[in-house]
Amino acid sequence: MLALKPADTTRYVSSNGGYAIEAHQLSVYYGNFRAIKDINLKVQRNKITALIGPSGCGKSTLLRAFNRMNDLVPGAHVEGEVRFLGRNIYAPNIDPVEVRRRIGMVFQKPNPFPKSIYENVAWGARINGFRGNMDELVEQSLREAALWDEVKDKLHQSGLSLSGGQQQRLCIARVVAVRPEIILMDEPASALDPIATLKIEELMHELARDYTIIIVTHNMQQAARTSDYTAFLLMDEDRAGILVEYGPTHQLFTNPKDKRTEDYITGRFG
Amino acid sequence: MMVVVRRAFIQELQQLQDEVLAMADMVEDALGKAVALLKARDVWGAQRLIADDRLINQKRFAIEAETLACIATQQPAAGDLRTLAAVLEIIGELERMGDYAKGIARITLMIGGEPLIKPLLDIPRMADIAREMLHQSMDAFIRRDLELARAIPERDDEVDNLYNQVYRELVALILNDPRNIDQANYLLWAAHNLERAADRVSNICERVHFMVTGDMVEVEDKAEAPRQLPAA
Protein backbone atom coordinates (compact mmCIF):
# COMPACT_ATOMS: atom_id res chain seq x y z
CA MET A 1 0.00 0.00 0.00
CA LEU A 2 1.22 3.44 -0.83
CA ALA A 3 1.47 5.64 2.21
CA LEU A 4 0.90 9.36 2.14
CA LYS A 5 4.35 10.69 2.76
CA PRO A 6 4.81 13.84 4.84
CA ALA A 7 7.07 15.14 2.09
CA ASP A 8 3.95 15.60 0.01
CA THR A 9 2.75 18.25 2.39
CA THR A 10 5.16 20.86 1.14
CA ARG A 11 4.34 20.18 -2.45
CA TYR A 12 0.68 20.26 -1.63
CA VAL A 13 0.83 23.59 0.18
CA SER A 14 2.73 25.25 -2.60
CA SER A 15 0.51 23.84 -5.31
CA ASN A 16 -2.98 24.53 -4.02
CA GLY A 17 -2.92 27.76 -2.06
CA GLY A 18 -3.55 26.40 1.39
CA TYR A 19 -6.35 23.86 1.17
CA ALA A 20 -6.01 20.99 3.61
CA ILE A 21 -8.54 18.73 1.93
CA GLU A 22 -10.89 19.04 -0.99
CA ALA A 23 -14.07 17.25 -1.98
CA HIS A 24 -14.66 17.11 -5.73
CA GLN A 25 -18.07 16.08 -7.02
CA LEU A 26 -18.27 13.83 -4.01
CA SER A 27 -21.26 11.56 -3.57
CA VAL A 28 -21.58 8.91 -0.87
CA TYR A 29 -24.02 6.05 -1.21
CA TYR A 30 -25.30 3.65 1.40
CA GLY A 31 -26.47 0.83 -0.84
CA ASN A 32 -28.73 2.49 -3.40
CA PHE A 33 -29.36 5.53 -1.25
CA ARG A 34 -27.32 8.56 -2.11
CA ALA A 35 -26.61 10.32 1.18
CA ILE A 36 -24.65 13.24 -0.23
CA LYS A 37 -24.58 14.45 -3.79
CA ASP A 38 -21.91 16.16 -5.86
CA ILE A 39 -20.26 18.02 -3.00
CA ASN A 40 -17.47 20.41 -3.90
CA LEU A 41 -15.72 21.84 -0.89
CA LYS A 42 -12.21 23.13 -0.34
CA VAL A 43 -11.23 23.19 3.30
CA GLN A 44 -8.71 25.85 4.32
CA ARG A 45 -5.61 24.72 6.09
CA ASN A 46 -5.26 25.61 9.80
CA LYS A 47 -8.78 26.93 9.92
CA ILE A 48 -11.87 25.63 11.60
CA THR A 49 -14.60 24.70 9.18
CA ALA A 50 -18.07 23.93 10.46
CA LEU A 51 -20.57 21.74 8.65
CA ILE A 52 -24.12 22.67 9.59
CA GLY A 53 -27.55 21.66 8.42
CA PRO A 54 -30.70 19.89 9.56
CA SER A 55 -30.69 16.27 10.66
CA GLY A 56 -30.24 13.89 7.77
CA CYS A 57 -28.62 16.45 5.48
CA GLY A 58 -25.47 14.37 5.22
CA LYS A 59 -23.05 16.50 7.22
CA SER A 60 -21.78 13.55 9.26
CA THR A 61 -21.55 11.46 6.10
CA LEU A 62 -19.46 14.18 4.50
CA LEU A 63 -17.26 14.45 7.59
CA ARG A 64 -16.73 10.71 7.66
CA ALA A 65 -15.95 10.71 3.95
CA PHE A 66 -12.95 12.89 4.74
CA ASN A 67 -11.15 10.02 6.43
CA ARG A 68 -12.83 7.02 4.83
CA MET A 69 -14.75 6.22 7.97
CA ASN A 70 -17.72 5.34 5.78
CA ASP A 71 -15.70 2.40 4.41
CA LEU A 72 -16.65 0.65 7.63
CA VAL A 73 -20.36 0.87 6.78
CA PRO A 74 -21.49 -2.17 4.76
CA GLY A 75 -22.71 -1.17 1.32
CA ALA A 76 -21.19 2.29 1.44
CA HIS A 77 -19.34 3.57 -1.58
CA VAL A 78 -18.29 6.90 -2.97
CA GLU A 79 -18.19 8.66 -6.30
CA GLY A 80 -15.99 11.65 -6.93
CA GLU A 81 -12.82 12.43 -5.07
CA VAL A 82 -11.44 13.61 -1.78
CA ARG A 83 -8.05 15.15 -2.34
CA PHE A 84 -5.60 15.22 0.49
CA LEU A 85 -1.92 15.97 0.05
CA GLY A 86 -2.52 16.10 -3.66
CA ARG A 87 -4.01 12.62 -3.90
CA ASN A 88 -7.45 11.12 -4.01
CA ILE A 89 -7.79 9.26 -0.71
CA TYR A 90 -10.19 6.84 -2.41
CA ALA A 91 -7.64 5.83 -5.04
CA PRO A 92 -7.01 2.08 -5.02
CA ASN A 93 -3.42 2.35 -3.84
CA ILE A 94 -4.20 4.42 -0.75
CA ASP A 95 -4.16 2.76 2.66
CA PRO A 96 -7.30 3.80 4.58
CA VAL A 97 -5.57 3.18 7.90
CA GLU A 98 -2.87 5.66 6.97
CA VAL A 99 -5.59 8.11 5.88
CA ARG A 100 -7.23 7.81 9.29
CA ARG A 101 -3.93 8.38 11.03
CA ARG A 102 -3.33 11.56 9.08
CA ILE A 103 -6.94 12.63 9.43
CA GLY A 104 -8.07 11.92 12.98
CA MET A 105 -11.56 11.89 14.35
CA VAL A 106 -13.24 12.88 17.59
CA PHE A 107 -16.71 11.49 18.10
CA GLN A 108 -19.88 12.78 19.66
CA LYS A 109 -19.63 10.62 22.73
CA PRO A 110 -16.26 10.52 24.46
CA ASN A 111 -14.93 7.02 23.87
CA PRO A 112 -11.73 6.51 25.82
CA PHE A 113 -10.39 2.98 25.97
CA PRO A 114 -10.86 1.19 29.31
CA LYS A 115 -7.20 1.78 30.00
CA SER A 116 -5.14 4.32 31.87
CA ILE A 117 -5.05 7.95 30.83
CA TYR A 118 -1.44 7.43 29.79
CA GLU A 119 -2.23 4.37 27.69
CA ASN A 120 -5.13 6.08 26.01
CA VAL A 121 -2.75 8.68 24.65
CA ALA A 122 0.19 6.37 24.00
CA TRP A 123 -1.79 3.68 22.25
CA GLY A 124 -2.19 5.29 18.82
CA ALA A 125 1.42 6.36 18.67
CA ARG A 126 2.60 2.93 19.75
CA ILE A 127 0.70 1.04 17.07
CA ASN A 128 2.02 3.54 14.56
CA GLY A 129 5.51 2.51 15.53
CA PHE A 130 6.45 5.59 17.51
CA ARG A 131 10.07 5.19 18.67
CA GLY A 132 10.63 8.43 20.57
CA ASN A 133 10.18 9.35 24.21
CA MET A 134 6.67 8.19 25.01
CA ASP A 135 6.43 10.13 28.30
CA GLU A 136 7.20 13.32 26.45
CA LEU A 137 4.71 12.56 23.72
CA VAL A 138 1.98 11.80 26.27
CA GLU A 139 2.68 14.99 28.18
CA GLN A 140 2.81 17.12 25.08
CA SER A 141 -0.39 15.62 23.69
CA LEU A 142 -2.20 16.10 26.99
CA ARG A 143 -0.94 19.67 27.10
CA GLU A 144 -2.15 20.28 23.56
CA ALA A 145 -5.54 18.95 24.62
CA ALA A 146 -5.52 21.30 27.64
CA LEU A 147 -5.82 18.34 29.98
CA TRP A 148 -2.30 17.97 31.39
CA ASP A 149 -2.77 20.08 34.50
CA GLU A 150 -5.88 18.17 35.45
CA VAL A 151 -4.44 14.66 35.02
CA LYS A 152 -0.67 14.90 35.48
CA ASP A 153 -0.89 13.37 38.95
CA LYS A 154 -3.11 10.49 37.93
CA LEU A 155 -1.83 9.37 34.57
CA HIS A 156 -2.23 5.72 35.50
CA GLN A 157 -5.81 5.97 36.57
CA SER A 158 -8.46 4.77 34.17
CA GLY A 159 -9.47 7.18 31.41
CA LEU A 160 -13.04 6.30 32.31
CA SER A 161 -12.60 7.91 35.75
CA LEU A 162 -12.56 11.35 34.16
CA SER A 163 -15.57 13.63 33.68
CA GLY A 164 -17.27 13.71 30.29
CA GLY A 165 -15.52 16.90 29.25
CA GLN A 166 -12.16 15.55 30.39
CA GLN A 167 -12.78 12.28 28.57
CA GLN A 168 -13.46 14.20 25.38
CA ARG A 169 -10.22 16.13 25.79
CA LEU A 170 -8.47 12.81 26.43
CA CYS A 171 -9.83 11.59 23.11
CA ILE A 172 -8.49 14.76 21.50
CA ALA A 173 -5.09 14.09 23.13
CA ARG A 174 -5.25 10.56 21.70
CA VAL A 175 -5.87 12.00 18.24
CA VAL A 176 -3.11 14.63 18.39
CA ALA A 177 -0.62 12.07 19.74
CA VAL A 178 -0.39 10.54 16.26
CA ARG A 179 0.29 13.98 14.77
CA PRO A 180 -2.52 14.15 12.23
CA GLU A 181 -2.88 16.96 9.73
CA ILE A 182 -6.62 17.24 10.08
CA ILE A 183 -8.93 16.63 13.02
CA LEU A 184 -12.53 15.79 12.24
CA MET A 185 -14.97 16.44 15.05
CA ASP A 186 -18.45 14.98 14.96
CA GLU A 187 -20.59 16.92 17.44
CA PRO A 188 -17.69 16.86 19.92
CA ALA A 189 -19.49 18.80 22.61
CA SER A 190 -23.09 17.70 22.25
CA ALA A 191 -22.84 15.35 25.23
CA LEU A 192 -21.12 17.94 27.43
CA ASP A 193 -22.33 20.63 29.81
CA PRO A 194 -21.93 24.31 28.80
CA ILE A 195 -18.62 24.86 30.61
CA ALA A 196 -17.07 21.68 29.25
CA THR A 197 -18.40 22.71 25.85
CA LEU A 198 -16.67 26.09 26.06
CA LYS A 199 -13.43 24.37 27.05
CA ILE A 200 -13.61 22.19 23.95
CA GLU A 201 -14.33 25.25 21.83
CA GLU A 202 -11.41 27.12 23.37
CA LEU A 203 -9.24 24.10 22.73
CA MET A 204 -10.31 24.02 19.09
CA HIS A 205 -8.96 27.54 18.67
CA GLU A 206 -5.64 26.49 20.16
CA LEU A 207 -5.48 23.37 18.00
CA ALA A 208 -6.22 25.31 14.83
CA ARG A 209 -2.71 26.76 15.01
CA ASP A 210 -1.28 23.35 14.22
CA TYR A 211 -4.16 21.43 12.75
CA THR A 212 -6.99 21.86 10.33
CA ILE A 213 -10.31 21.22 12.04
CA ILE A 214 -13.60 20.24 10.50
CA ILE A 215 -16.51 20.11 12.88
CA VAL A 216 -20.05 18.89 12.48
CA THR A 217 -22.40 20.60 14.87
CA HIS A 218 -26.12 20.88 15.39
CA ASN A 219 -25.49 23.91 17.51
CA MET A 220 -25.47 26.89 15.20
CA GLN A 221 -24.17 29.22 17.86
CA GLN A 222 -21.27 26.85 18.32
CA ALA A 223 -20.57 26.95 14.60
CA ALA A 224 -20.81 30.74 14.69
CA ARG A 225 -18.55 31.02 17.74
CA THR A 226 -15.87 28.58 16.80
CA SER A 227 -15.46 28.34 13.07
CA ASP A 228 -13.71 30.42 10.45
CA TYR A 229 -15.70 28.92 7.60
CA THR A 230 -19.13 27.38 7.53
CA ALA A 231 -20.68 25.02 5.03
CA PHE A 232 -24.44 24.67 5.02
CA LEU A 233 -25.93 21.43 3.75
CA LEU A 234 -29.50 20.57 3.03
CA MET A 235 -31.41 17.63 1.62
CA ASP A 236 -32.57 18.00 -1.95
CA GLU A 237 -35.82 16.46 -3.24
CA ASP A 238 -34.21 12.98 -3.39
CA ARG A 239 -33.19 13.38 0.27
CA ALA A 240 -29.55 13.52 -0.78
CA GLY A 241 -27.40 16.07 1.04
CA ILE A 242 -26.23 18.97 -1.09
CA LEU A 243 -23.94 21.86 -0.28
CA VAL A 244 -26.05 25.00 -0.36
CA GLU A 245 -23.60 27.64 0.74
CA TYR A 246 -20.04 27.79 1.92
CA GLY A 247 -18.18 30.87 3.05
CA PRO A 248 -16.58 32.79 5.89
CA THR A 249 -18.60 32.19 9.03
CA HIS A 250 -19.15 35.85 9.85
CA GLN A 251 -20.57 36.42 6.40
CA LEU A 252 -22.76 33.33 6.44
CA PHE A 253 -24.27 34.30 9.77
CA THR A 254 -24.80 37.98 9.07
CA ASN A 255 -25.51 38.05 5.39
CA PRO A 256 -26.03 34.65 3.80
CA LYS A 257 -26.35 34.67 0.04
CA ASP A 258 -28.86 31.86 -0.25
CA LYS A 259 -32.42 32.19 0.98
CA ARG A 260 -32.34 28.57 2.22
CA THR A 261 -29.33 29.36 4.42
CA GLU A 262 -31.09 32.42 5.79
CA ASP A 263 -34.22 30.39 6.55
CA TYR A 264 -32.19 27.76 8.35
CA ILE A 265 -29.93 29.94 10.44
CA THR A 266 -32.74 32.25 11.44
CA GLY A 267 -34.79 29.22 12.48
CA ARG A 268 -37.49 29.85 9.89
CA PHE A 269 -37.81 26.21 9.02
CA GLY A 270 -37.57 22.94 10.80
CA MET B 1 -41.13 20.35 4.33
CA MET B 2 -40.98 23.99 5.35
CA VAL B 3 -42.54 24.65 8.72
CA VAL B 4 -42.45 28.07 10.28
CA VAL B 5 -40.89 27.81 13.69
CA ARG B 6 -39.88 30.40 16.27
CA ARG B 7 -43.25 32.08 16.24
CA ALA B 8 -42.60 33.79 19.57
CA PHE B 9 -39.33 35.24 18.31
CA ILE B 10 -40.90 36.41 15.07
CA GLN B 11 -43.64 38.09 17.08
CA GLU B 12 -41.06 39.71 19.31
CA LEU B 13 -39.22 41.06 16.27
CA GLN B 14 -42.47 42.41 14.89
CA GLN B 15 -43.35 44.03 18.18
CA LEU B 16 -39.97 45.74 18.40
CA GLN B 17 -40.44 47.20 14.95
CA ASP B 18 -43.90 48.42 15.95
CA GLU B 19 -42.33 50.08 18.97
CA VAL B 20 -39.83 51.85 16.69
CA LEU B 21 -42.76 53.11 14.62
CA ALA B 22 -44.46 54.38 17.75
CA MET B 23 -41.28 56.16 18.80
CA ALA B 24 -40.92 57.71 15.34
CA ASP B 25 -44.50 58.98 15.63
CA MET B 26 -43.62 60.67 18.90
CA VAL B 27 -40.58 62.31 17.31
CA GLU B 28 -42.44 63.37 14.19
CA ASP B 29 -45.09 64.89 16.40
CA ALA B 30 -42.53 66.65 18.60
CA LEU B 31 -40.77 68.22 15.61
CA GLY B 32 -44.05 69.50 14.18
CA LYS B 33 -45.21 70.84 17.51
CA ALA B 34 -41.86 72.46 18.29
CA VAL B 35 -42.00 74.58 15.16
CA ALA B 36 -45.70 75.39 15.61
CA LEU B 37 -44.99 76.52 19.17
CA LEU B 38 -42.08 78.63 17.95
CA LYS B 39 -44.28 80.24 15.36
CA ALA B 40 -46.96 80.90 17.98
CA ARG B 41 -44.33 81.86 20.60
CA ASP B 42 -46.18 79.56 22.97
CA VAL B 43 -43.89 79.44 25.99
CA TRP B 44 -46.13 77.15 28.04
CA GLY B 45 -46.47 74.70 25.23
CA ALA B 46 -42.70 74.76 24.72
CA GLN B 47 -42.14 73.96 28.37
CA ARG B 48 -44.48 71.00 28.09
CA LEU B 49 -42.68 69.77 25.00
CA ILE B 50 -39.32 69.99 26.77
CA ALA B 51 -40.69 67.93 29.65
CA ASP B 52 -42.23 65.41 27.28
CA ASP B 53 -38.89 64.70 25.63
CA ARG B 54 -38.35 62.45 28.61
CA LEU B 55 -41.02 60.14 27.21
CA ILE B 56 -39.11 59.78 23.95
CA ASN B 57 -35.94 58.98 25.85
CA GLN B 58 -37.77 56.42 27.97
CA LYS B 59 -39.15 54.82 24.84
CA ARG B 60 -35.66 54.57 23.44
CA PHE B 61 -34.33 52.87 26.56
CA ALA B 62 -37.25 50.48 26.67
CA ILE B 63 -36.74 49.44 23.03
CA GLU B 64 -33.00 49.15 23.57
CA ALA B 65 -33.49 46.92 26.61
CA GLU B 66 -35.95 44.71 24.74
CA THR B 67 -33.64 44.47 21.74
CA LEU B 68 -30.66 43.51 23.85
CA ALA B 69 -32.73 40.91 25.68
CA CYS B 70 -33.83 39.54 22.34
CA ILE B 71 -30.22 39.30 21.12
CA ALA B 72 -29.11 37.65 24.35
CA THR B 73 -31.89 35.12 24.48
CA GLN B 74 -32.68 34.36 20.86
CA GLN B 75 -29.26 34.40 19.19
CA PRO B 76 -30.58 36.05 16.04
CA ALA B 77 -28.67 35.65 12.80
CA ALA B 78 -28.61 37.05 9.29
CA GLY B 79 -31.64 39.23 8.44
CA ASP B 80 -32.99 39.04 11.98
CA LEU B 81 -29.68 40.14 13.43
CA ARG B 82 -29.43 42.99 10.96
CA THR B 83 -32.98 44.05 11.83
CA LEU B 84 -32.11 44.21 15.52
CA ALA B 85 -28.89 46.07 14.76
CA ALA B 86 -30.92 48.50 12.66
CA VAL B 87 -33.41 48.96 15.49
CA LEU B 88 -30.62 49.87 17.90
CA GLU B 89 -29.19 52.43 15.49
CA ILE B 90 -32.52 53.88 14.45
CA ILE B 91 -33.75 54.50 17.99
CA GLY B 92 -30.51 56.40 18.66
CA GLU B 93 -31.17 58.59 15.64
CA LEU B 94 -34.78 59.10 16.72
CA GLU B 95 -33.79 60.10 20.20
CA ARG B 96 -31.42 62.73 18.84
CA MET B 97 -34.19 64.02 16.59
CA GLY B 98 -36.34 64.33 19.69
CA ASP B 99 -33.54 66.39 21.22
CA TYR B 100 -33.64 68.71 18.22
CA ALA B 101 -37.35 69.29 18.82
CA LYS B 102 -36.54 70.02 22.45
CA GLY B 103 -33.81 72.42 21.31
CA ILE B 104 -36.33 74.32 19.19
CA ALA B 105 -38.69 74.49 22.19
CA ARG B 106 -35.86 75.99 24.24
CA ILE B 107 -35.43 78.63 21.58
CA THR B 108 -39.13 79.44 21.94
CA LEU B 109 -38.46 80.00 25.65
CA MET B 110 -35.49 82.23 24.88
CA ILE B 111 -37.41 84.35 22.37
CA GLY B 112 -40.27 84.58 24.86
CA GLY B 113 -43.03 86.98 23.96
CA GLU B 114 -40.97 89.31 21.78
CA PRO B 115 -42.25 89.72 18.21
CA LEU B 116 -40.51 87.68 15.53
CA ILE B 117 -38.09 89.56 13.30
CA LYS B 118 -39.49 87.78 10.24
CA PRO B 119 -42.49 85.71 9.38
CA LEU B 120 -41.63 82.03 9.80
CA LEU B 121 -42.15 80.37 6.44
CA ASP B 122 -39.03 78.45 5.52
CA ILE B 123 -38.43 76.98 8.97
CA PRO B 124 -41.89 75.35 9.07
CA ARG B 125 -41.27 74.09 5.53
CA MET B 126 -38.01 72.56 6.67
CA ALA B 127 -39.88 70.89 9.53
CA ASP B 128 -42.56 69.59 7.16
CA ILE B 129 -39.99 68.06 4.84
CA ALA B 130 -37.96 66.57 7.68
CA ARG B 131 -41.11 65.04 9.17
CA GLU B 132 -42.21 63.71 5.82
CA MET B 133 -38.77 62.18 5.29
CA LEU B 134 -38.97 60.59 8.72
CA HIS B 135 -42.39 59.19 7.98
CA GLN B 136 -41.24 57.76 4.67
CA SER B 137 -38.10 56.31 6.25
CA MET B 138 -40.33 54.37 8.62
CA ASP B 139 -42.31 53.08 5.64
CA ALA B 140 -39.04 51.98 4.07
CA PHE B 141 -38.02 50.33 7.35
CA ILE B 142 -41.24 48.39 7.81
CA ARG B 143 -41.66 47.44 4.16
CA ARG B 144 -37.95 46.72 3.56
CA ASP B 145 -38.28 49.13 0.66
CA LEU B 146 -34.79 49.62 -0.68
CA GLU B 147 -35.78 52.04 -3.43
CA LEU B 148 -37.57 54.28 -1.00
CA ALA B 149 -34.64 54.13 1.40
CA ARG B 150 -32.39 55.30 -1.42
CA ALA B 151 -34.74 58.03 -2.60
CA ILE B 152 -35.48 59.71 0.75
CA PRO B 153 -31.98 61.14 1.40
CA GLU B 154 -32.19 63.01 -1.89
CA ARG B 155 -34.81 65.22 -0.26
CA ASP B 156 -32.19 66.28 2.24
CA ASP B 157 -31.00 68.71 -0.45
CA GLU B 158 -34.30 70.57 -0.19
CA VAL B 159 -33.79 70.98 3.53
CA ASP B 160 -30.19 72.09 3.08
CA ASN B 161 -31.23 74.65 0.47
CA LEU B 162 -33.92 76.04 2.74
CA TYR B 163 -31.41 76.22 5.53
CA ASN B 164 -29.02 78.22 3.39
CA GLN B 165 -31.86 80.50 2.39
CA VAL B 166 -32.83 81.07 6.04
CA TYR B 167 -29.19 81.76 6.81
CA ARG B 168 -28.93 84.43 4.11
CA GLU B 169 -32.15 86.11 5.19
CA LEU B 170 -31.09 86.19 8.83
CA VAL B 171 -27.67 87.59 7.97
CA ALA B 172 -29.38 90.30 5.94
CA LEU B 173 -31.62 91.11 8.92
CA ILE B 174 -28.59 91.33 11.20
CA LEU B 175 -26.81 93.63 8.79
CA ASN B 176 -29.92 95.73 8.59
CA ASP B 177 -30.29 96.12 12.34
CA PRO B 178 -27.82 94.71 14.88
CA ARG B 179 -30.62 94.50 17.44
CA ASN B 180 -31.78 91.47 15.44
CA ILE B 181 -28.63 89.55 16.31
CA ASP B 182 -29.99 87.57 19.23
CA GLN B 183 -33.19 86.42 17.64
CA ALA B 184 -31.56 85.81 14.28
CA ASN B 185 -29.08 83.62 16.07
CA TYR B 186 -31.89 81.72 17.81
CA LEU B 187 -33.82 81.19 14.60
CA LEU B 188 -30.71 80.02 12.80
CA TRP B 189 -30.22 77.57 15.61
CA ALA B 190 -33.76 76.27 15.13
CA ALA B 191 -33.19 75.92 11.40
CA HIS B 192 -29.95 74.13 12.07
CA ASN B 193 -31.73 71.64 14.31
CA LEU B 194 -34.14 70.84 11.49
CA GLU B 195 -31.33 70.50 9.01
CA ARG B 196 -29.66 68.02 11.36
CA ALA B 197 -32.94 66.18 11.85
CA ALA B 198 -33.12 65.57 8.10
CA ASP B 199 -29.53 64.30 8.18
CA ARG B 200 -30.57 61.83 10.86
CA VAL B 201 -33.27 60.53 8.54
CA SER B 202 -30.57 59.87 5.96
CA ASN B 203 -28.73 57.84 8.60
CA ILE B 204 -31.91 55.86 9.22
CA CYS B 205 -32.11 55.17 5.50
CA GLU B 206 -28.54 53.89 5.53
CA ARG B 207 -29.57 51.50 8.30
CA VAL B 208 -32.56 50.31 6.32
CA HIS B 209 -30.25 49.69 3.38
CA PHE B 210 -27.96 47.65 5.58
CA MET B 211 -30.84 45.75 7.11
CA VAL B 212 -32.17 44.75 3.70
CA THR B 213 -28.93 44.08 1.83
CA GLY B 214 -26.27 43.47 4.46
CA ASP B 215 -24.15 46.13 2.77
CA MET B 216 -23.00 49.20 4.62
CA VAL B 217 -23.39 52.24 2.41
CA GLU B 218 -23.03 55.88 3.13
CA VAL B 219 -25.58 58.19 1.63
CA GLU B 220 -23.76 60.94 -0.15
CA ASP B 221 -24.61 64.48 0.74
CA LYS B 222 -24.84 66.04 -2.69
CA ALA B 223 -25.98 69.46 -1.67
CA GLU B 224 -23.63 72.23 -0.79
CA ALA B 225 -22.64 71.64 2.81
CA PRO B 226 -24.87 73.79 4.98
CA ARG B 227 -23.30 76.37 7.15
CA GLN B 228 -22.60 74.70 10.42
CA LEU B 229 -23.39 75.79 13.91
CA PRO B 230 -22.84 73.78 17.05
CA ALA B 231 -25.69 71.35 17.62
CA ALA B 232 -28.37 72.26 20.14
Image (tube, grey):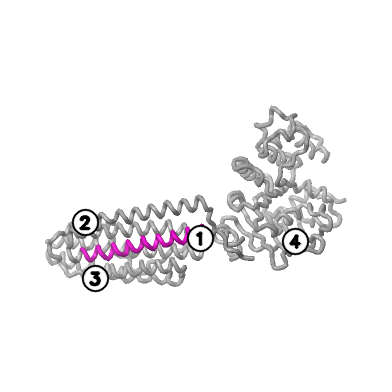
Q: Tell me which residue sits at (79%, 61%) in the image.
A: A29
In this view, the residue farthest toward the top is A153
Type of amino acid under label 3: Asp
- Check disc 1 and report its element: helix, strand or loop: helix
Kind of residue at disc 1: Ile
Give the distance between the C-alpha atoms of the residues marked 4 and 1, in whole angstroms.
Answer: 33 Å
- Where disc 3 sits, the SS reads helix
**Residue A43: percent from left, percent from top:** 68, 55
Callout 4–callout 3 Cβ contact below 8 Å: no
Residue corresponding to mark 2: B47
Q: Nearer the viewer, mark 1 or mark 2?
A: 1
Circle 4/circle 1 CB separation < 8 Å: no
| x and y percentages locating residue B9 in the rendered image | 51, 57
- Discs 4 and 1 lie in a common subunit: no
Identify the subunit bearing mark 2.
B
- The lab-note entry on whether marks 4 and 3 share a chain reads no
Residues packed near mark 3 inside 10 Å, few (<14), some (14 to 19) or many (20 plus)? some
Q: Which residues are magenta?
A: B8-37
- Chain of the residue that carries numbered disc 4 in the rendered image: A
Name the kind of residue labelled 2 in the image.
Gln
* Main secondary structure along the magenta-highlighted residues: helix
Question: What's the distance in space between the residues labelled 4 and 3, CA to CA?
Answer: 69 Å
Disc ID at residue B10: 1
Question: Residue tagged by mark 4?
Answer: A35
Between A52 and B22, the one nearer to me in the picture:
B22
Q: Using the numbered discs, state the Cα–Cα distance from disc 1 to disc 3 in whole angstroms.
A: 43 Å
Packing grade of label 4 (10 A; few <14, some 14-19, many >=20) is many
Q: CA distance from mark 1 to mark 2?
A: 40 Å
Q: Earlier in the sequence, mark 2 or mark 3?
A: 2
Q: Quadrant of residue A42?
A: bottom right
